[in-house]
Amino acid sequence: MTENEQKIYEKRKKVIYDLMCDKTYVPMKEKELAVILQVAKEDRPVLRRLLEDLMLEGRIEVSRHGKYRKAQSKALMGTFLAHPKGFGFVEIEGREEDIFIPETEIHGALHKDTVQITLLPEQSGKRAEGTVIRILERGIRELVGTFQQSRNYGFVVPDNQRFLYDIFIPKEYTRGAVSGHKVLIELTDYGTEGRNPEGRVKEIIGHINDPGTDILSIVYSHELPLEYPEKVIHQAERTPDAVLESDRAGRLDLRDWQMVTIDGEDSKDLDDAVSLTFDGTLYHLGVHIADVSNYVQENSALDREALRRGTSVYLVDRVIPMLPHKLSNGICSLNQGEDRLALSCLMDIDENGNVISHRIAETVICVDRRMTYTGVAKILANQDEDIRQEYEPLVPMFEQMERLSGILRKKRKKRGSIDFDFPETKMLLDEKGIPVEIKPYERNVATKMIEDFMLIANETVAEDFFWQEVPFVYRSHENPDPEKMQKLAVFISNFGYGMKAVRDEVHPKEIQKLLTRIEGSPEETMIARLTLRSMKQAKYTTECTGHFGLAAKYYCHFTSPIRRYPDLQIHRIIKDVLRGRMTQERLAHYEAILPGVAQQSSKTERAAEEAEREVEKLKKAEYMQGHIGAVYDGVISGITGYGLYVELPSTVEGMVHVSNMVDDHYYYREDSYDMVGMRTGKSYTLGQKVKIRVLDADRETRTIDFVLAGEDEEDGERIKEADSE
C-alpha cells in the first residue's frame, strides 16, 4: 500500500468510526452499514477489512448478532485455549494472567482460535473473566482422531481433548476408513453452537491396534513432517559421500590431532568432536563441529526444509531428523576414521577456567575413536582395567578432560549457574512398540564433561560475535517474574529457607545457593521442581540478553547444526566473517531474516518438546496398564484442588484423585501447597513420601490413576516377583 493509499484507507476508517460515535447511531450489521455508507457490492470486502481493523484496534465491537457499534469496553485480542471440561482461557500477549472464559461465554470459539473478547464486570476475589465477541482466525485446520463408522456417514473423536466436539464426516469423504482407524482430517466447516464441525479424511494413519500407530498419531497431531519433499531428497542424494579435495582448500588441517566423539550408544548423527592437550599451564581445548553449512546452501530446498522443521525430534521409537539421513548420518556426521569438514572453536583455558584466547576456524578433521558416555565413564569413574587397556592411548586425554571439566563446572557454579539435575526417562520397547522397562537415565562423568565443553564453546562464540556487532542468533533465558519468585520465597520460608532480593530481581546465584542448601533434604525434589516452574522458558532471539539459568552474559547454540537450525544459521554468519564476506549487503540480509529464523526455531522447538512429552506420557500409561494393582513407594510431586500427583522412582507420575481419598474430606491450601483433611487434620505436602497402589491407566487420555495404599501393602517389585513365580 502506497503512502497515499494508506491515507485514504485511514480516512475511510475515521468515517466509519465517527458514524458509530454519533449519538443517533443505532448498532447495524455489515449490510446495513454498506447501504448507509453507499458502498458498492464489489467494495464490500474492503468494508469488511476496515471493520476488522477497527475491531483489532479495540475501537469498535460486534455483538453476537453481528451488529457493530463503538466499543463499550476495551476489546482484547488473544488465543483461546479450551479446557476439556468446557470452559477456556484466552492468552493475551504482554498480559501476565490469562482471561477465564466461562462455558456460556465461548460462543463457538475452538481451541487455538484467535479471538476478540471483552471483559465481564469484575467480581471481587475472582480472576478476570471475559466473553468471546468475535472469532478472528481459526487456529486448527487439521486434527487427528479415531474414526467411528455409521451406515451413511462417519464421525471422528479427536485425540486432542481440548477440541470439544466430534467431527461429522460425510460418507463421500471417509476415504474408506473403518471404525478404529486413526485418521488425519481436514476441517471443512467449523459448525455453530448447535451443530458439530465437519471435515474430510485426509489420511488414514493406521488402526489403533497396529504397532506404532499411537506414536504416529502424536506425530501427525503436532504437524511434524515425516517425509521429505522430492526436491529435498534429490538434493541430498547429490551430496558427496566423502570430502572433496576442492572443499579442503584454505582450511586448517587438524587431521593429525588426537580427537574423539563421545555420544550415546544409539547416536548416529555425530556432530561434535573434542580434543585436549595440557602444556603445564594452559589447557588447549578444541570443540570441532560438523560444517553442515558446506552442504546445506542458504535458501536451497534442503535449507528451506531444515528451517521448516527447525529441529530433530527424538521420540522413544524413532528420530524425525531435521536433515535427511544421507547428510545427518553420512557426510555431516563425524564418523571415526573419516575425513570431515568442521568449524572448530580452539580455546586456551587457564587453571581457573578462564578462556585466555581463542580461535574459530574452518578445519579438516579425522576422529580417532567413536566413544560412548558409558565407555568413558567406565574409564574414569569405574577405573575398568579392560576398558582402560583397550583405549590406552586416549586415557591420559580423558583424565585431562575430567580435570578441565571440573574446573569449568566450578567456575560456572561460582558465578551462579543453576543445575537442575532431574533424571530423564529411559524407556525400552519390545518389537511391537510396547514398553517393557522404564527407568531414570542418570548423567555420568562423561555426559557432564561433554556438556561442560559444549557450554564453554557456545559462550565463547556468542561473546566473540556480540563484540563484532554483526547480526546473530542468541539463546536467551530471561530473568524470572519477580511475583513468582516472591511466591516461591514465601513458600520455602515454611521450611526455614530464604532468598535475597526477590521483590525486584533475583540473581541466579540465589537460586543456586537454595538448591545447594536443600540438597539431600526430604523437600529437595519438591522445592527444585517449584523453582524450575517459577522460571521462564529459554528461546532464540536476535538480541543478546543473556542466559539467566547459566548466569551467562553471552550464549548461543553453536554445537549441533545437524539437529538444530539456529546452529546452522550462525555457522553461515561465522563463515561469512571468517572469509571477509560480511558486506553491508550481507549485514542487511541477516538483519532482515534473523528475527524470522529465531521465531520459527523457538516455535518448532516447543512443538518438538510437546510431542516428545506426549509420547512419553502415552508409553508410561501403556506400561502402567500392565501393573494395575501393584504398590509402589513414591513422592508427592504436585498438589492441586483435584488431588495429589505422585512420582515413582521410575519417573512415572500419576494422580491420587481427591474423590479417591475416602478416609476424610480434603481441601487444598494454595498458599502452603498442601492438602488437609477437615476431620482428621491429616495433611499431605509436596515432597512427602507416600505408598500408592495403581488404580487405572488410560492410553487415550495419557493419564495414570493411583490410590493411597496402606503401609502393610506389598510393594510393586515384590508383586511382580510373585507373579513371575
Image (spheres, rainbow, N blue to C red):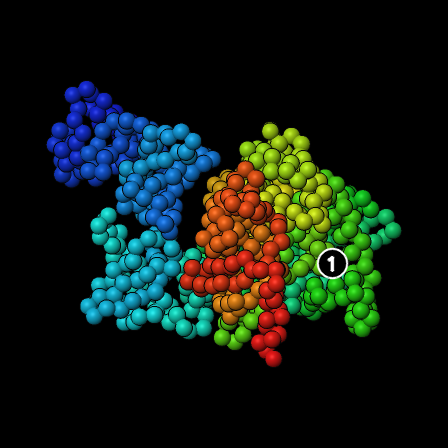
Residue 224 is left or right of residue 636, and the answer is left
90 or 680: nearer the eye? 680
Taking the spot 75% from the left edge, 41% from the top edge, the residue there is: 414
Taking the spot 23% from the left edge, 22% from the top edge, the residue there is: 21
Above-or-below relation of 437 to 351: below
Q: Residue 299 location in percent, x, y?
A: 47, 53
> Mark 1: which secondary structure?
helix
Q: Residue 486 location in percent, x, y?
A: 58, 33
- Quadrant for residue 104, please give it: top left
As drawn, the residue found furthest toward the right would be 280
- Quadrant for residue 219, please give it: bottom left
77 or 249: nearer the eye? 77
Residue kind at label 1, given as amino acid type? Val
On the question of residue 640 being in view, the answer is: no
Q: Check the picture and name the quadrant holding the C terminus.
A: bottom right
As drawn, the residue found furthest toward the bottom would be 725
On the question of residue 16 being in view, the answer is: yes
Q: Residue 68 location in percent, x, y?
A: 21, 32
Q: Residue 392 location in percent, x, y?
A: 82, 69
Task: Name the residue carrying label 1.
Answer: 445
As drawn, the residue found furthest toward the front would be 679
382 or 305: nearer the eye? 382
Q: Check the picture and name the quadrant holding the N terminus.
A: top left
Taking the spot 76% from the left edge, 52% from the top edge, the residue there is: 405
Label 1 crowding class (10 Å Cα cut-off): few <14, some 14-19, many 20+? Answer: some
Taking the spot 48% from the left edge, 54% from the top edge, the residue there is: 662
